[in-house]
Image: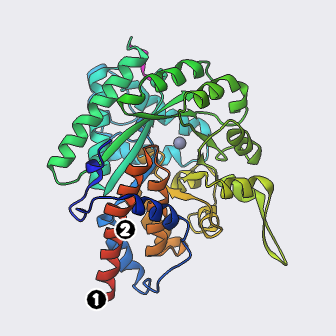
């Protein structure tokens, strides 16, 4: 597969095998920091928009532009809480922040309602790519549950095709605008419904059409992956990756179940912090926490989303910082940009401003995310060595000169 997709203006070097090996080693040496984090918080935050970012956990039906929802709703006569786009954007964030799961889920009633035709899916997919590219995202895996978009008669395959067409348009337009980005899809099955097998087969059938993994979304508690072990058994035998939402709403048992079913990454996973204690000898990791850390199973952490749903008290006290310091394979993500009123750049800025993250921390999570992307290892190495590392080196250089 070509690695040119990930090239940025700062990257012209071809990638050799030695560099692949180096990049794997690089990913594990996050503590070897140079004293480069002497700049102010404001200076670091100002750098964030220009830094290349890697996004692994972002939901298509949680990333619509408010103005687009207003237009699509008008076309189909769907009633919204307000038809003023700015007000609607605020409504989504407020409704998602009440701590009430019912109100949180109500927000998706509106986004899913307007995503029932191929043109609507295509448009929203295109706009998502453009919004991510404008945020400095150079590689993204966007996920969606095809079964949520068949109310008006689309087949599951037609949903996948429409989203892919939108991604392709967005990628082409972003490239023309000078923001190269690579975008792939993850297909989710809804945990509380019974189409897991069907969606898993759909994902595998589309592996050459930009679908790179399978996920379970929806209510975590009470719907463990082990309810259908045959689905994950089939995925393993097809050599097809899965990432599973786990350790967001439910605790370590849920994480253990996802790991046992072969998840290579964990959606959120923050409740793993419950398996890390402290005594007079220092940090004490339980068996599960050790396993996840030692196997380098990446955590797709979404800080603002967790604060909104009560999974963390604040950004400052969010377990992501501790998990990162403990050496877990932490990545930072958006989850639902609309419901959280956020972007990946904003999530990173919040961690810098409220949790003391440094330029090294930002580079570390970008490299970790790239290293755990569901693409071939040569592509991951190229992304790290020709896009991320040079950009951060340049940023450090700029800060030294300042
Ligand atoms: Zn999610």
Image quarter of the N terminus: top left
Mark identifier at residue 303: none
Question: Which residue occupies 33% across, 29% down?
Answer: 163
Q: Earlier in the sequence, mark 1 or mark 2?
A: 2
Relative image position of residue 140 (x, y in whole percent): 38, 47
Residue most toward the front?
17
Look at the image and tell me whether residue 402 can be seen: no
Residue 343 or residue 28, whichever sits in front:
28
Question: Is label 2 in a helix, a strand or a loop?
Answer: helix
Question: Which residue occupies 73% across, 32% down?
Answer: 222
Question: Is label 1 in a helix, a strand or a loop?
Answer: helix
Mark 1, Cα crowd under 10 Å, few <14 / some 14-19 / many 20+, is: few
Foreground mark, 1 or 2, reads: 2
Relative image position of residue 168 (x, y in whole percent): 25, 35
Look at the image and tell me whether residue 384 can be seen: yes
Q: Count the labels in the image.
A: 2
Image quarter of the C terminus: bottom left
Mark identifier at residue 401: 1
Residue 399 or residue 97, whichever sits in front:
399
Q: Is residue 98 left or right of residue 7?
A: right
- Some atom of ligand 1 lies within 8 Å of the CB belonging to the residue at label 2: no
Residue most toward the top?
153
Q: Which residues are magenta?
A: 148-152
Relative image position of residue 348 (x, y in whole percent): 44, 64
Q: Is residue 182 above or below residue 153?
A: below
Q: Is residue 218 magenta?
A: no
Mark identifier at residue 389: 2
Relative image position of residue 213 (x, y in whole percent): 49, 35
């Amino acid at each position: 597969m070509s690695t040119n997709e990930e090239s940025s203006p700062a990257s012209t070097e071809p990638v050799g095998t030695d560099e692949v090996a180096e990049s794997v080693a690089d990913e594990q040496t996050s503590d070897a920091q140079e004293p480069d984090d002497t700049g102010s918080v404001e200076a670091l935050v100002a750098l964030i928009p220009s830094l290349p970012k890697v996004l692994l956990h972002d939901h298509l039906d949680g990333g619509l532009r408010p103005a687009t929802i207003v237009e699509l709703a008008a076309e189909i006569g769907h009633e919204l809480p307000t038809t003023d786009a700015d007000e609607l954007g605020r409504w989504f964030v407020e409704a998602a922040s009440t701590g009430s799961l019912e109100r949180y889920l109500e927000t998706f009633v509106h986004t899913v309602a307007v995503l029932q035709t191929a043109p609507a899916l295509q448009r929203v997919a295109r706009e998502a790519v453009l919004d991510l590219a404008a945020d400095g995202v150079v590689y993204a895996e966007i996920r969606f549950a095809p079964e949520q978009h068949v109310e008006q008669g689309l087949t599951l395959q037609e949903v996948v095709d429409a989203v892919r067409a939108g991604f392709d348009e967005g990628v082409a337009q972003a490239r023309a605008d000078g923001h190269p980005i690579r975008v792939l899809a993850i297909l989710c099955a809804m945990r509380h419904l019974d189409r897991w097998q069907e969606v898993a087969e759909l994902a595998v059938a589309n592996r050459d059409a930009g679908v790179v993994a399978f996920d379970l979304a929806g209510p975590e508690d009470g719907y463990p992956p082990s309810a259908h072990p045959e689905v994950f058994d089939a995925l393993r035998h097809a050599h097809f990756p899965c990432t599973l939402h786990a350790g967001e709403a439910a605790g370590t048992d849920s994480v253990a179940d996802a790991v046992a079913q072969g998840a290579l990454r964990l959606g959120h996973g923050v409740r793993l912090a419950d398996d890390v204690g402290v005594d007079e000898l220092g940090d004490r990791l339980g068996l599960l926490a050790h396993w996840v850390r030692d196997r380098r199973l990446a955590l797709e952490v979404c800080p603002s989303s967790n604060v909104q749903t009560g999974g963390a008290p604040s950004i400052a006290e969010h377990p992501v910082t501790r998990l990162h310091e403990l050496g877990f394979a932490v990545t930072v993500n958006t989850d639902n940009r609309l419901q959280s009123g956020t972007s990946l750049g904003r999530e990173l800025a919040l961690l810098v401003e409220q949790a003391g993250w440094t330029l090294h921390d930002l580079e570390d999570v970008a490299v970790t995310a790239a290293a755990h992307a569901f693409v071939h290892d040569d592509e991951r190495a190229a992304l790290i060595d020709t896009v991320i590392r040079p950009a951060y080196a340049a940023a450090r250089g700029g800060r030294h000169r300042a």
